[in-house]
Image (cartoon, grey):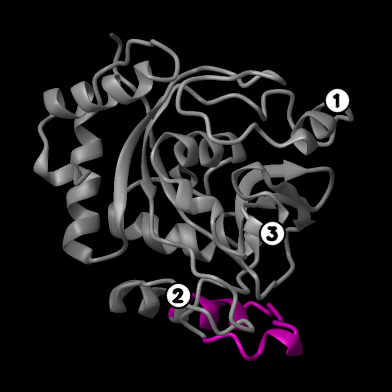
Amino acid sequence: MAVEAQDAGQLVKDQRRAVSAFFGTEIPNPPDQLFEVAEIIRQEGLFRVEPFYLPRRSFPKGITFPGQQVPMSTNLYRYIKEGLVNADANTLPGQWVILDVTQRPGYEDGKQMYPDTVQFKELLATGRELGYKRGIVVPDYCRRVPEDSRFAVSADEIDGSVGYVSKVVAELLNIEPDRVTTPDYATFYYVGNLSHSEFGQVNTGEWFRNSFGHGARLVGGDSVLGGLADVHDWYSDDHYGVMGFRLQVSFSSETL
């Protein structure tokens, strides 16, 4: 679903059809800025994106809905109960997002690459260099990972305490850096069930925005561990050759 090819009315119609299959929910109009940002992404040649409305709905344990392929991870409910993640970690935020839907590749000894554009690869390589200058040390076991890869980039570097990825992308899009993040697990799970089952069909994982305890993040999506139902934790400052990422841009929604 190419954002630039649709007007607001058609976008709402398409998302209403998709969302109603899950929740029967009415959705608000997308803000004008969504189309402006999508056009910049297209012009800059960053990555493949699609717009989604994420209705303010939770996924209680045991819930089923039309189109559901797999249940949500049982780990998540345990983490919520133990206070290791936010109490609303199984809830969608009720907002429009532009989500990077670039296909995550399968594992090839850390040398696997997303089908990224030259422009985005250059951004990643530049970001890594900035990270090195700030004292970020990549472990020797990740040296085989290409400099312009999405793998072996820590969550802190993507959208955390360092955040060079989100900052550089936000600057290009002329928006605030805190609006460029990795998706949370609930968003990943919902979109994966809605229209992108491939998110859970390869033996690599990706970072999520959810904090876990102190100094960690949720990660998941690995087909070996459950695909869309896979979620566990990893240190947010670690570089891991099997862990990639995708980005989303968040928008406030107009009222119905």
Mark 1, Cα crowd under 10 Å, few <14 / some 14-19 / many 20+, is: few
- Residue lying at 52% horizontally and 29% vertically, measured from the top left: 68
User: In this rendering, does residue 192 appear at all?
Assistant: yes
Q: Quadrant of residue 10?
A: top left
- Element class at badge 1: helix
- Element class at badge 3: helix
Please state which amino acid type lies under the numbered disc 2: Leu
Instruction: Kindly identify which residue carries mark 2.
Output: 124
- Element class at badge 2: helix
Q: Which residues are magenta?
A: 126-146
Q: Residue 127 magenta-drawn?
A: yes
Please state which amino acid type lies under the numbered disc 1: Lys
Please state which amino acid type lies under the numbered disc 3: Val
Instruction: Kindly identify which residue carries mark 3.
Output: 224
Q: Quadrant of residue 116?
A: bottom left
* Sequence order check, earlier mark of 3 and 1: 1
Instruction: Kindly identify which residue carries mark 1.
Output: 81
Q: Which residue is more in the foreground, 255 or 14?
A: 14
* Sequence order check, earlier mark of 1 and 2: 1
Q: Left or right: where does residue 121 sit relative to residue 57? A: left
The quadrant of the image that shows the C terminus is top left
* Residue 137 drawn at (x, y percent): 71, 82
Q: Nearer the viewer, mark 1 or mark 2?
A: 1
